[in-house]
Image (cartoon, helix red, strand yellow):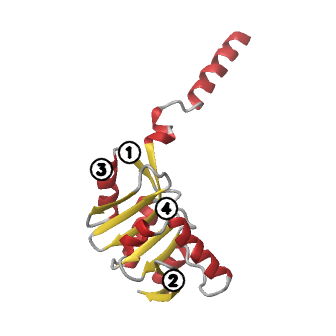
Amino acid sequence: MKGLKLGLALVTAGLLAGCASDGNVSNKSYLRAAVIGSDSVTMSFFSGEDEVMTVSADSPEEALSAAELRGGKKIFTGFTELVLLDGCDCTDTLERMLREWKVAPSCIVACPRGNGAEFLTSRTAEELEGAVRVAQEQELIGRCDIVNVLGELLGSGSAEIPELSRDGFVGKKSIK
């Protein structure tokens, strides 16, 4: 009986170990930030080897699929820290980001001043996110995580989000 229990325990432990290649972190790209435009999406990743990638697409879902095909890796969006809205339908885009991409509820929503796609190549997503966090600490902008921004858009029809330039935080902008 002890042998059976021990065998069962070893089999269970083997199944729970998660040895499948799908769980290997080197088989995935981890999205750090995205600029969502009306017809393209620019993505920045945590890994330096993945660089910045721009894909043409009519929706965030199409962009994700196209980026996975181009990069040859599945893209994990659950750690996304920053989404820049650049001329897209804000409410629809943010709903898709939560529902389809499953971005973190703490993901910051902002808009670019100028060409947002160039921001991710000229300045890292980490620096842009840091500029927003400092502006929040100084009470220059309120909560601008994706859940709060989407809640305001669905509730009142508009929301205030940070506006970013190449130099960081430049002010607030109302979106609808």
Q: Could you tell me how far apart the alpha carbons at marks 4 and 3 are, in whole angstroms?
A: 21 Å
Seen in the picture, residue 17 relative to 80 is either above or below; the reply is: above
Q: Is residue 172 visible?
A: yes
Q: Is residue 1 visible?
A: no
Seen in the picture, residue 71 relative to 40 is either above or below; the reply is: above
Q: Could you tell me how far apart the alpha carbons at marks 4 and 1 are, in whole angstroms?
A: 18 Å
Where is residue 150 shown, x and y percent of the image? Answer: 48, 77
Q: Amino acid at mark 1?
A: Lys
The residue identified by callout 2 is 152
**Viewer-side label of 4, 1:** 1
The residue identified by callout 1 is 73
Quadrant the N terminus occupies: top right
Q: Secondary structure at mark 3?
A: helix
Q: Amino acid at mark 2?
A: Glu
The residue identified by callout 4 is 103
N-terminal of the pair, mark 4 or mark 2, is: 4
